[in-house]
Amino acid sequence: MKLSDHNLNTLMIFLQQKIEENAEYVANELTNGNSTDFLTYPPNGGLTETEKSSLGKLKNDPNLESALRKILADSSAGVLFELLNIIDGTSDPDENIGKWTEISFVDKTEEIAENAEILHDELYSKYWDWKKIRPNKSWKLDNYEE
C-alpha cells in the first residue's frame, strides 16, 4: 500500500499553503506591534517580558515584515523537509532520541483509521520530553524556571 498521487499532491500543496499563511500571520502580528499571545510553541509561550518589549521595536517596517515572512517560511519548510526525510527513509532521527524503525505515509483505510494515533496532540506535550534530553545550551525556548 502506498500514498496515492492525489493525496501526495494535495498534502504537499497544503504544506506550502500553511508555510506561507503561518509566516505571513506571524510577521504581520510582530510588525503591527500586536500581542505575542498567539505563540503556541513552546507550550508556555516562552517569551520573557524583555523579549516581548524588544519585539515592539519591529513595528511598521514593510521591509522587515517581508524579510520575517521569508525567514519564518524557510524555518518551517526546513523542519518539514527533515520530517519528510525521515518518513522517506533518507535520514534517521538522532539515535539518542529514541528507537526508530521507520514509518511511511499510506492512504487511510477503515482498518488504519480504527487504530490511528492522533499525532498533532503529541507535538506540544513532547516538548518537555525533548527539553530533558536536549544538549545543554546557553538558551532555551521556554521561560520555565527549573
Image (spheres, rainbow, N blue to C red):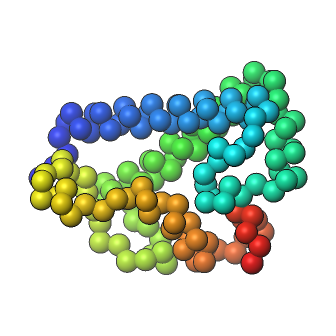
Q: Residue at x 54, y 44 (%)?
A: 76
Q: Answer left or right for 76 relative to 82.
A: right
Q: Answer left or right for 61 relative to 46.
A: right
User: Considering depth in this image, is 36 or 68 the residue closer to the camera?
Assistant: 36
Q: Answer left or right for 65 relative to 121.
A: right
Give the image quarter of residue 70.
top right
Give the image quarter of residue 88.
bottom left
The quarter of the image holding the C terminus is bottom right
Percent across and percent down for residue 130 are: 56, 71
User: Considering depth in this image, is 120 or 98 the residue closer to the camera?
Assistant: 120
Up/down of 100 relative to 7, above or below: below
Q: Residue at x 79, y 33 (%)?
A: 33
Farthest residue in the top direction?
Answer: 62
Percent across and percent down for residue 78 are: 52, 46
Q: Residue at x 65, y 36 (%)?
A: 26
Residue 141 appears anywhere in the view: no
Labels in figure, total: 0
User: Considering depth in this image, is 16 or 114 the residue closer to the camera?
Assistant: 114
Residue 15 appears anywhere in the view: yes
Q: Residue at x 50, y 42 (%)?
A: 77
Up/down of 15 relative to 122, above or below: above
Percent across and percent down for residue 125 are: 51, 66
Give the image quarter of residue 29.
top right
